[in-house]
Amino acid sequence: MKTKRLTMAQALVRFLDNQYVEVDGTEKKFVKGIFAIFGHGNVLGLGQALEQDSGQLSIHQGRNEQGMAHAATGFARQSLRHQIFACTSSVGPGAANMITAAATATADRIPLLLLPGDVYATRQPDPALQQIEQPHDLSISTNDAFRTVSKYWDRISRPEQLMSACVSAMRVLTDPAETGAVTLSLPQDVQGEAYDYPEYFFQKRVYRIERRPATTAMLDDAMALILRKRKPLIICGGGVKYSEAGAALQAFAERYQIPFAETQAGKGTLVSSHPLNVGGIGETGTIAANLLAQEADLVIGVGTRYTDFTTSSKWIFQHPDVTFLNINVSRFDAFKLDGLTVVADARLALQDLSTHARLADYRAGWDNRVAQVRRTLLAEIERVYQVEYSGEDFIPEIDDHLNRKRVFAEFNALTQSFLTQSRVLGVVNNGIDRDAVIVAASGSLPGDLQRIWRTTGTNGYHVEYGYSCMGYEVNAALGVKMAQPEREVYVMVGDGSFMMLHSELVTTIQEGLKINVMLFDNMTNGCINNLQMEHGMDSFFTEFRFRDGQKNRLNGGLVPVDYAAIAAAYGCKSYRVTTLEQLHFALEDAKRQTVSTLLDIKVLPKTMIHKYLSWWRVGGAQVSDSERIQAVDRMLREHIAEARQY
């Protein structure tokens, strides 16, 4: 047996450089490269290996471990999970910073390979710098925290263990049903240890991402169920996008005249203008989709994991005989809502159902109802895209509690802006190129985007909402741009999320990878401010205010921040936007720039778009001195009684 004497880290690099995937007969290198922040736990091991011979792997320097891991996730997601970046960090805090990104990738079913340094396997220098000691278990390190957020976790405590660990890692990373974060913990001493690795460990490996067909019995059951129903509604989930099943879903919907709604992950698979597309569904859904959801007697969930936002906490489907047909490559997701399961690739299953003779004469019984709700939706989009502030537009019984009139005046005095969030979104939606990609993740913006954003291009809607991770936006946009450098990338981010994490904005300057940051500054964590106030509370530590001397209160003035100045200091072209004229100019001028841009858009608080016929179960106090909170508790109990229990 021929062998090659290498350090464990050198063997890992060589292995990663020879991994490929094959999708529908097309072969592609699976590991594009590595994001790295070097510290004492990885610089002399994996760092040395990469310096000596990184092969065809592309190496990139991160600014924050969580940020670079979000960039890797954004890259993999935009690449439809067919190509990834790995991420390496030092031990301790460097590794811990990646835990949030690991959770995000796993929640969203996105392949992410993490290679954190670890404490010494020999334990000779224990406790090493940045090592956590647990008296009851000396084998525990920071990296054990990755176990709960990884789909596969391993610790390479001997150099020969690398081989089986790498094969297992690739099995998970390339499995559409099981993919997510994979963590290989690399003790810093073992990284540099030598071993005679067999040459066949470094051979080229090609993992076929197979399309699993539905069984005949599954298809027969699905067809029998469809034939019994008059008003089916399709939910297009992220699995449709990753399966590249858009054309198959369109053919299926058109043949049987079945309307389709979209999850956050599924939105953008088909353009918004399609006559059967009724838009986002659930808590952040459109008026059209949520009306049909309440009337549907069959819900055909394709590639969706049915989060509580999609189902409005299992409340939105109100038909007494509603049944669920779940087409999903994941058996776990296919069983949700006690539905009829078709465990299969979305494209193959939809194609089989579209061409089967038993359904030849079937047509859904919606008649002109779909066209009717779509007209309502289009009119509503046009309305909210034109909403402007007027000093007369206040409802006393609502605004006395929300303090909207006072906050508007205060905000305007600081910014001289009366821009509304929905109006700005309309201008951006109409002003960017049709093939541009938008990126968002948290706060009120994903809700607004799912309700009213009109998609026009393929794979141009990149919204992370499975984990709703603040700080994903700017950093993931770097990965999106790396995946598709020919497209303009626009980040939709609130001020709170921008402050949470935007480290890789600097990396976009370093790498010459231009992104455009649309920063909506309302001096508030507005989504949660609305949530607490709509549920009976007063504004409590969700607005960005100075302390006025009262204990446990921030009741002073709003805290102004010049985000344009921050971005300019990084090397971005930045704009301060307080009027529609400035917004139009900045959007057009940003297109001409070659460096990343940031539009510091001052938008009035509380001007996001409110929900349409939905309900979301959030924890509320069952005991309170507030009559408003007591009323919310009563409403909660009523809705729970109407919702499905499992």
Image (cartoon, helix red, strand yellow):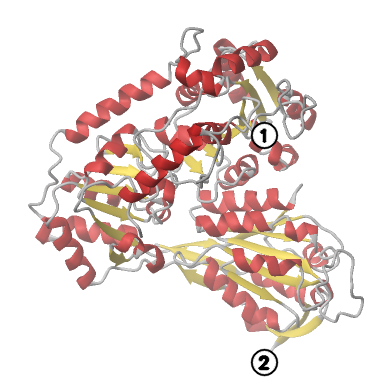
Residue that badge 2 annotates:
1
Q: Position of residue 148 (x, y in %)?
A: 61, 66
In space, the residues marked 1 and 2 are separated at their CA atoms by 66 Å
Q: Quadrant of residue 29?
A: bottom right
Question: Where is 304 relative to 366, above or below?
Answer: below
> Residue 223 vs residue 81: left or right?
left
Residue 451 shows up from this direction: yes
Q: Where the N terminus falls, by quadrant? A: bottom right
For label 2, count other residues whose C-alpha is less than 10 Å away and answer few (under 14), some (14-19) or many (20+): few
Q: Residue furthest left?
A: 361
Mark nearest the camera among 1 and 2 is 1
Q: Where the C terminus falls, by quadrant? A: bottom left
Q: Residue furthest front?
A: 625
> Residue 190 vs residue 322: left or right?
right
Q: Amino acid at mark 1?
A: Phe
Question: Where is 224 relative to 574, above or below?
Answer: below
Q: Position of residue 319 (x, y in %)?
A: 21, 47
Residue at the spot 80% in from the left edge and 28% down from the top edge: 569
Q: Residue furthest bottom?
A: 1
For label 1, count other residues whose C-alpha is less than 10 Å away and answer few (under 14), some (14-19) or many (20+): some
Q: Amino acid at mark 2?
A: Met
The front one of 404 and 18 is 404
Residue that badge 1 annotates:
541
Q: Position of residue 325 (x, y in %)?
A: 26, 59
Question: Where is 95 relative to 560, above or below?
Answer: below
Q: Quadrant of residue 84?
A: bottom right
Residue at the spot 43% in from the left edge and 20% down from the top edge: 385
